Structures are given as C-alpha cells and as structure tokens.
Image (cartoon, rainbow, N blue to C red):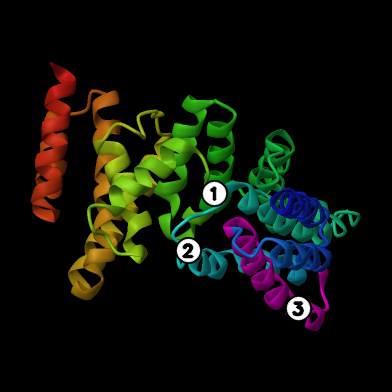
Amino acid sequence: MEQKQAAALLKDAYDKLKASDAKEACVLLEQALDIDFENEEVKYALKCVHWWLEHVRKIDEIREPYEKGGFILSLLKPYHIFLEQFDNAYDHCQYVIRYYVYSKALFFFKGLLGSPANQHDPGLLLLVGRCYKGLGNYEEALNYLEQAVRFKREDAETLAEVADLNALLAETKAAKALFREAFFLDPSKIDIRSLESAFILELRDKVARLGYSEDLLCEWIPVYGYLWSVFSVKRELKQTEVGRLKQSIFSLEAECEANPGRKELLKPRLLNRYFWLIDHYENNHEDPSLIEETLLKIKVTDPDIYQKYTGQTRSEKK
C-alpha cells in the first residue's frame, strides 16, 4: 500500500515538473520519501529536482529574457557532471527534467519572437530550435533551425543541429552531408553534448575511446568520420570553394610550422582538408601527381592516419 502511494506521488511530481512547477514537484517527492524511504527512484528524483531548484534560483538576478533562457540552457553541462555521481539513471526522471529545462528556456525565447527584428536573429532562432528539439518536436525545431541557416549560412553549430534533426527524422543522407560540412567549417563551435542522433553519438564515443582529450575530441571526429565511412556523403566543390580550401590548407601548414605548440590542435583540421582536396582531385580527374603530393603531406603530418587512409581507399577500390 505504501509503495503504491509513493508511486502515485512520484507520478504527480513528474507531472508537476513537466508543467514547470519544480517547487511543487519537490514537495510531492518529499511526501513520497516520507512514505517509502527505500524508494531509490524517489531519492534520485528528489536530488535532481533539488539541484535545479538551487541553480535556477539565480535567474531572478537576470533582467533580459534572452539571457534568462541562455542561463537555463547553460546549466545543462554542470548538471550532466552532477549526474556522474549516480550509478543508476532513471530515464523517466531525466525525460521530465529535460522537458522542464527546455520548456522553461523556450518560454523566455519565444517571448522575443514577437519583434520582427528578432525573427531574423540566427542566434535566437538556433536556441528556439534547440529547445523544440529537446522537447521532441523535431519538425518545429527544423523549421527554426533552417531559418537560422538562411541568415547565417556558414555557422558550424547551426549546421550540426540541422544535421542532427535530419538524422532524428531518418533523413540519413542529408544528415551525413550536413555533419561533414559542419565539422569542416569549425569543429570547436559544435556543442557535441547537444547532439542526439544515434550515429553521431556512436562516432563520438568511438573517437573518445581512442583517448583524445575533450578539447580535441570534436577536432578528430571529422577525420575518423571520413576514415570509418560515416561522413560518406560528399559534394562537388565550386571553384571559389576550391580556392578557399587551398588557402586554408596553406594557412594551417604555415601556422603548424610557426607554432609547434598548436600542432596537435591544428593537425586534425589539416588532415580533414587534405581529404577534401583529394576528393576534389579524384572527382575532377585531375593530374594524379596532385593526389600523390597531397598523400605525401598526409603521411608527413600523421603516418598512422596515412596508413588508415590508404588502407581504406585500397579496400574501396577492390
């Protein structure tokens, strides 16, 4: 009987949390714990709700709605660190907390969309889209994120979010092409924690298991994404893009030479650009000596990646 009462209170607490009433959810969870002190999910949920109540309290010190919403989303990273202390996670609890967080942030962001100027703000559109994605409304999220891309075409973070949504909507080909573009533009701008699609999370975890530090993880994802044929959807480059690609390679090579301390950070970006350049040469049936020259640069930059790359291309040609 007591277990049923506690379970009913737990359900009511989750409903309150989804309705953005964390304080009432906390009251109900404390009542449930008084009834069934051994209920592990109640104890877990209570700790999580307490964490959010403690941290969102600071929102009253913030005046601007945009900053209020941004502050709420900024708490997700420390919250995930907080969760690492628990051996077990309760998925339904995390689902309702996620709903609480994104709906609360969306409330502040949506209030700004009444202004015509804000409707063209790619940063705001990105955040609104991310909130809708967090709430599971993928179609609405894609609508806002595609608008954001139209206003800011070469933004790695927004492109990665559009790619993620395409993957969640089972548009895998488009997702792979867009992820490849996003990680080419600037891996450091991509918030890997905000991505949800299965294949990009699997790629992230596989690269992480190779031992790269967190600050280098996103830099190496496009390299291994290419080598493992995850980023397998390619496109032909325009002539202006080829020129920019070659200039980018020249600049990175020069920076690696001038700043050896930054080479570990710059190396994966350089390797990825070599891959793009070889693809361009092959697609346009350029002089094979250009390909050999670029392959030699890959070998000098990272012999291990060279071996993996040449082994992959040989197997593809068989």
Task: From the image, tell me which residue sits under label 3.
Answer: 57
User: How far is disc 2 from disc 1 in space, using C-alphas?
Assistant: 39 Å
Callouts 2 and 1 close, C-beta under 8 Å = no
Callouts 3 and 1 close, C-beta under 8 Å = no
Judge left or right: residue 78 versus residue 103.
Answer: left
Callouts 2 and 3 close, C-beta under 8 Å = no
Stretch of the chain drawn in magenta: 40-65
User: How far is disc 2 from disc 3 in space, using C-alphas?
Assistant: 24 Å
Task: From the image, tell me which residue sits under label 2.
Answer: 86
Residue 118: give x, y in percent of width and height.
82, 57
Would you say residue 303 is visible in this rendering? yes
* SS at mark 2 in the image: loop
Instruction: Let me know if residue 4 is in the magenta part.
Output: no
Which residue does the image show at 83% across and 62% down from the upper left? 21
> Of circles 2 and 1, which is in front?
2
The residue closer to the viewer here, 14 or 40, is: 40
Judged by its main secondary structure, the magenta piece is: helix
Which residue does the image show at 68% across and 40% down from the upper left? 136
Mark 3 residue crowding within 10 angstroms, few (<14) / some (14–19) / many (20+) = few
